[in-house]
Image (cartoon, rainbow, N blue to C red):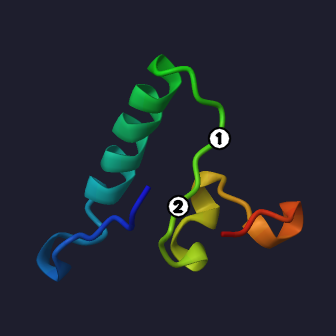
Amino acid sequence: MGSICIHPDYQRMGYGKAMLEHTFEIIKKMGYDTVINFGNPDNYVVRGYKSCKKYNVCF
């Protein structure tokens, strides 16, 4: 999954969280149990993401 970008005028209004939640629902329906995000990890840890380095996941 690529980074989620929200225009600065609309940041901190819940749009990013809503987009992530919507994406997670789609992913669950597709049968996946793991998501790899290519965005800045600092922006996603609050949503439950963990560093790939901890699990030896890399390209």
Q: In which quarter of the image is residue 50?
A: bottom right
Q: Is the residue under label 2 in contact with that under label 1 (CB below 8 Å)?
A: no
Label 2 neighbour load within 10 Å: few <14, some 14-19, many 20+: some
* Residue 36 image point, x, y percent: 58, 55
Placement of 48 over or under 26, stated as above or below: below
Image position of 33 (left or right of 8): right
Counting other residues with Cα less than 10 Å from the Cα at mark 1, is it few (<14), some (14-19), or many (20 or more)? few
Q: Residue 34 carries which label?
A: 1
> Looking at the figure, which quarter contains the N terminus?
bottom left
Image height of 34 relative to 7, above or below: above
Quadrant of the image containing the C terminus: bottom right
Q: Which amino acid does label 1 sit on?
A: Thr
User: Vertically, is 30 above or below 21?
Assistant: above
Residue 6 as seen in the image, left or right of residue 33: left
Question: Tag 1, which secondary structure?
Answer: loop
Q: Which residue is found at the position 87% from the left and 67% from the top?
A: 54
